[in-house]
Amino acid sequence: MAKILIVGCGAIGSELAEVLAAQGHEVTGLKRKPPLSASGPIRYVAADISSSSDLAGLDGDFSQAFFIVSPDGRDEQSYRAVYETGLDNLLVRFAQTPWLMVSSTSVYGQSQGEWVDEDSVAEPANITSQLIRQAEQKLLALNPANIVVRFSGIYGPGRESLLRQATQAPAIQQTPPYFTNRIHQRDCIGVLAFLLEQRLAGKALAQCYLASDDDPAPMWDVMTWLADRLHCPPPSVKKVDADIGMNKRCSNARLKALGYRFQYPSYRDGYSELISAQR
């Protein structure tokens, strides 16, 4: 079994730690405020990655590290704290450790409903996405064994903003379609555990994977379907926004060719479960 470091133990990181520990791996979770009552096989360490001194006491012989961070805010300073300062500190301390970085499909700037994959141009317009993209490039250039996984919009228990929005009869662009892409939180964890499994099995892996479900869909279709299931008024038609950004369709072909199968291949699968749980 492997010795694993997980940097960032929020909802995804902490559940990934539990999954990997249950598989027999030795897991250390890095978190600024670890759970006070933490017990069991996962070793939690209190650390702020923006402070290099917080990392000094950590073991240096991890066989795999995961970078699953969330900035404190949506502003540039918060993103620089983790994707520049924090990542730099980690890569100095663990330069020889293979890294898997959780990134975002926000690094794509396409806005006309184009299909994108791992080889598509990634030139985002906004500064926060630019900082994520720069972090990707830094990590991939350091070691050919490092991997970036770009998640699309994550939803699941506790991430139900689209359900709340659907109850408010929102104005949605209908024509031309504004495409949305998503991945269920459990598939995020499934993808990360799957890629580790493939690596430990000796499979040759690419440096980048796009992780999004099988069903990029127009927001109009998603909201209309949700409103029907929630017994709410349907959305209204919004005037076309010529300057709307991030209108794209994400291809998961590379990940599926490697053998991953989604637990929630469509928004209908995931949101049906969430709606049933609410009832």
Image: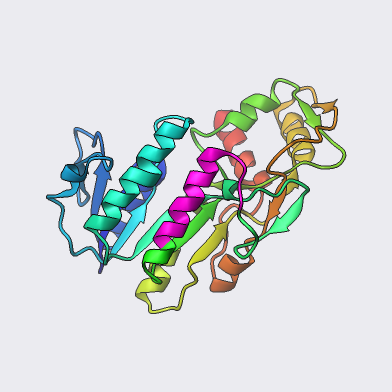
Q: Quadrant of the C terminus?
A: top right
Q: Residue at x 35, y 73 (%)?
A: 200
Does 139 appear above or below 11? Answer: below
The type of colouring in the image is rainbow
Quadrant occupied by the N terminus: bottom left
Residue at 30% over, 63% down: 64
Q: Report the predominant secondary structure element of the magenta stretch.
A: helix
Q: Position of residue 72 (x, y in %)?
A: 39, 31
Residue 28's spot in the image, x, y percent? 23, 52
Q: Residue furthest right?
A: 175
Give the camera-side residue of 254 and 229: 254
Give yes or no for residue 264 being in the magenta stretch: no
* Residue at figure coordinates x 49%, y 57% from the top left: 149
The answer to whether 191 is drawn above or below residue 13 in the figure is below
Instruction: Say whether residue 43 is left or right of residue 105.
Output: left
Visible residue check, residue 181: yes
The residues colored magenta run 123-139
Magenta stretch containing residue 130, yes or no? yes
Coordinates of residue 17 in the picture (x, y in percent): 31, 51
Task: From the top left corner, tell me how far across and down residue 97 is, in percent.
Answer: 28, 65
